[in-house]
Image (tube, helix red, strand yellow):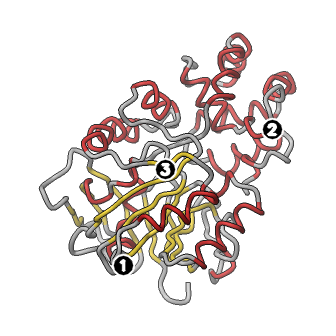
Amino acid sequence: MRASTDPLVRTAERYRAFAEVEARGMSACYEAWAAGVAADPATVALIDQLPAVKRQPNLVFSAARLHGAAAGEYPAFAAWLCEHWTDVAATCITHATQTNEPGRCAVLLPALAALAGPLALIEVGASAGLCLHPDRYSYRYRLADGSERKFDPSDGPSPVVLDCDVTGPVPLPERMPDIVWRAGIDLHPLDVSSEADVAWLDALIWPEHDDRRARLRAAVPVARQQPAPIVSGDLNEQIEALVARAPAGATVVVFHTAVLAYLNEADRNRFSEQMTRLPVRWLSNEGQSVVLGVLERLSEPPAEASAFILALDGEPIALTQPHGRSLHWLAPGD
């Protein structure tokens, strides 16, 4: 579990870790806010009024932005947070970090397309299900030599175009994977047809990431055309029954991105055990120390502390940028 999501870690340390690992190079605003909170006992005392599992930097900052906190320097944010704490705290209690970034499909697509089809997709931690439609988005992969490869859905270009920089021997697909069934699991599913839920998805996008915000607004109508069913409940309790519902003859692929970090160690290990026992292919895209044994299978740790590891059935196959902006495919021996 990352320090920023670990409820057993002191609040100041959670925010310091978020600033130094997750926000650095990704959001100057959130890096400044998190570093500011870590050094500000008054704001830490406010946040400590929340249950430990609700003190996550990403949750508190997203709730603040939902209520109108403007991106900027930390002192102004601290003053705003103190004034609006009642509203922010109420949102933290009723909401969860459910970032639903369709851009992550760009790093999943090569792995999905390489599997024997047809495919039945199950996403755990699915939020509103935007990542359950990888075959309904267009892709633009930028290769190291400056060239581009573009892929469109079978019925033509999508209003959602996912850009991704790729390096290494990436097996870019010749065609879209054949997906015949899709479903998800989430503790508190978001409804893609609900404007309030879409507003929360928007608030979860980090301040400087305008391209992600535009992508969300384009992806929502696509998902609304054929919404995927999302089961409400704990992933460990629901996964076996949902796997059993997949159509016969399909390769069942269970996948997730930035989800297991929010589980405690026992629950993560239980989920990993189920993935080895059930008749599925398991595609994980998580922080480096989240999935047991994956980091240890690399020849050396990734240079970027924030990089995720994409693994198939527990074996690392690529390094990814957390929101899908880049993909480095691993060569044998990496």
Element at label 3:
loop
Q: Quadrant of the C terminus?
A: bottom right
Dot 1 falls on a residue whose secondary structure is loop
Nearer the observer: mark 3 or 2; the answer is 3
Q: Residue at x 49, y 50 (%)?
A: 126
- Left or right, 226 with respect to 110, comes to left
The residue under label 1 is which amino acid type? Leu
Which residue is more in the foreground, 107 or 163? 107
Residue 263 drawn above or below residue 114: above
Residue drawn at (39%, 52%) of the image: 103
Q: CA distance from mark 1 to mark 2?
A: 40 Å
Which amino acid, by three-letter code, is at mark 3? Ala
Outermost top residue:
83
254 relative to 46, above or below: below
- The residue carrying mark 2 is 52
Do the numbered discs 3 and 2 sit on residues whose CB atoms are within 8 Å? no
Check if mark 1's residue and mark 3's residue have beta carbons within 8 Å.
no
Residue under numbered circle 1: 115
Instruction: Identify the disc placed on residue 126.
Output: 3
Residue 56 point in image, percent of width and height: 71, 39
Please name whichever residue, 158 or 34, is drawn nearer the observer in this view of the structure.
158
